[in-house]
Image: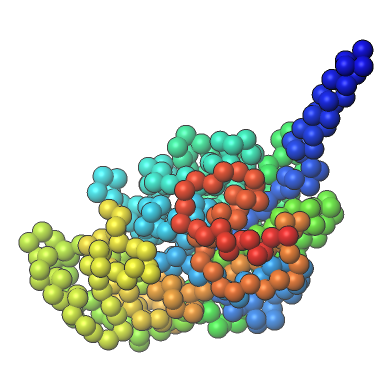
């Protein structure tokens, strides 16, 4: 009998030990909300126009800046943030692309909805879904595409007419569902600041007004999360994809003066320029484009500086050219169009350009409070997000050490 009691006690101890190890802690699975403010340059934060973001930084983690991946464009960087891979590795190498098999990709056409463009990598919402985490995307490049047979549990096809308020309401509606339906990973995306900075320049009153507006939206989100007791109980990560440099039509390198346009396919122009010489003209075009000249530099795709992590993917054209910050590379025909913008803002430049620096803020139960961290690369965001969701990340280019100092 004594033996039986002792055995039962031993079993009980084992059972309790197992419970201590495996029982979910009440705070172990908080929701994660990933917010992107497109085009929010790191130093916009210092303008004193974003008190709500400042309050989040004061109570959470703020990076001096976040270095985007090259090219510093919207689609490549949004996919980098949710894969931890450089564009060369995830395959969304530009906003405009030509693939040897798939043909032309441009985000203005529905061809982007072809899954194969995105399937070079697995975005976080797919990995989360495969590991039992419910997901919801209130816009994110690639999130309205079926990738490797998966979609977010909740998503909407991109619609630029949907206001910031409507997007926040949708996120809250998803969070207000019963536990069995509630998503645990959510994205939210705002593009108005990017648009105003493109149209009027990063130093314009219009950009400042958009900055105030998006900050007010963040304030609304925080207030609504507080009502639900979620502000301190959800992890909030706020990022941008790239910054913005002031441009001027006077600062343009005209391609016609360098190369015979009939001998090239111009895949992209403007900032991160891609050129494929037409067959038979390779040597002539290379000679013209690779010659040293002011305000622009070109490389063969395999010869870009290693720090750019760019140049092996089949979608990258044979020659890649990048203008000096604030300059453009255009054809005379494009430059002379009557609606050509004289002043404005652009991105896509070298990711070492301080104007391209992006925003990083984080707040919630996982994060230290009132911590400033030095600049880091945006590939490091993905391992952080996977950790917050408690899922196994896919192989990636990120450095997990970056997140360690941010976490409680
Ligand atoms: Zn962008």
Most foreground residue, 98 or 109 = 98
- Residue 357 seen from this side: yes
In the picture as drawn, the residue positioned furthest to the left comes out as 280
Quarter location, residue 136:
top right
* Residue occupying image coordinates x 72% and y 39%: 182
* Residue occupying image coordinates x 64% and y 39%: 134
Q: Judge whether 252 appears above or below 33 on screen.
A: below
| In the displayed structure image, the side of residue 217 where residue 375 appears, left or right | left
Q: Where is residue 28 drawn, in percent x and y?
A: 75, 45
Quarter location, residue 351:
bottom left
Q: Where is residue 194 drawn, in percent x and y?
A: 53, 69
Most foreground residue, 7 or 314 = 7
Q: Judge whether 214 appears above or below 154 on screen.
A: below
State the quadrant of the N terminus: top right
| In the displayed structure image, the side of residue 22 where residue 385 appears, left or right | left
* Residue occupying image coordinates x 60% and y 82%: 205
- Residue 110 seen from this side: no
Most foreground residue, 384 or 277 = 384
Colour style of the rendered protein structure: rainbow
Q: Where is residue 286 drawn, in percent x and y?
A: 15, 71
State the quadrant of the C terminus: bottom right
């Amino acid at each position: 009998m004594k033996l039986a009691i002792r055995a039962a006690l031993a079993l009980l101890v084992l059972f309790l030990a197992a419970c201590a190890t495996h029982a979910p802690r009440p705070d172990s699975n908080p929701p994660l909300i990933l917010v992107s403010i497109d085009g929010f340059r790191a130093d916009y934060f210092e303008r004193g126009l974003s008190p709500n973001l400042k309050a989040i930084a004061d109570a959470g983690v703020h990076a001096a800046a976040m270095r985007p991946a090259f090219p510093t464009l919207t689609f490549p960087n949004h996919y980098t943030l949710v894969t931890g891979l450089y564009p060369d590795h995830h395959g969304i190498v530009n906003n405009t692309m030509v693939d040897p098999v798939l043909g032309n990709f441009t985000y203005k056409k529905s061809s982007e909805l072809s899954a194969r463009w995105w399937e070079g990598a697995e975005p976080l919402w797919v990995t989360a879904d495969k590991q039992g985490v419910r997901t919801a995307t209130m816009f994110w490049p690639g999130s309205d595409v079926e990738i490797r047979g998966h979609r977010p549990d909740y998503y909407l096809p991109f619609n630029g007419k949907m206001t910031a308020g409507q997007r926040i309401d949708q996120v809250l509606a998803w969070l207000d569902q019963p536990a069995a339906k509630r998503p645990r990973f959510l994205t939210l995306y705002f593009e108005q600041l990017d648009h105003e900075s493109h149209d009027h320049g990063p130093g314009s009153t219009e950009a400042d007004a958009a900055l105030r507006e998006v900050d007010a939206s963040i304030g609304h989100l925080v207030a609504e999360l507080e009502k639900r007791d979620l502000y301190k109980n959800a992890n909030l990560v706020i990022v941008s994809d790239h910054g913005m440099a002031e441009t001027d039509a006077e600062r343009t390198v005209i391609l016609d003066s360098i190369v015979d346009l009939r001998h090239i396919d111009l895949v992209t122009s403007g900032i991160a320029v891609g050129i494929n010489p037409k067959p038979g003209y390779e040597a002539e075009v290379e000679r013209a484009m690779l010659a040293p000249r002011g305000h622009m530099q070109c490389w063969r795709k395999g010869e870009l500086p290693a720090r750019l992590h760019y140049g092996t993917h089949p979608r990258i054209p044979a020659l890649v050219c990048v203008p000096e910050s604030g300059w453009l590379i255009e054809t005379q025909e494009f430059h002379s169009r009557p609606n050509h913008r004289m002043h404005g803002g652009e991105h896509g430049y070298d990711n070492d350009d301080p104007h391209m620096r992006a925003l990083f803020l984080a707040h919630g139960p996982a994060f230290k409070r009132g911590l400033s961290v030095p600049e880091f690369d945006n590939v490091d965001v993905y391992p952080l997000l996977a950790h917050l969701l408690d899922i196994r990340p896919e192989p990636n280019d990120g450095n997990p050490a970056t997140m360690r100092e941010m976490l409680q």
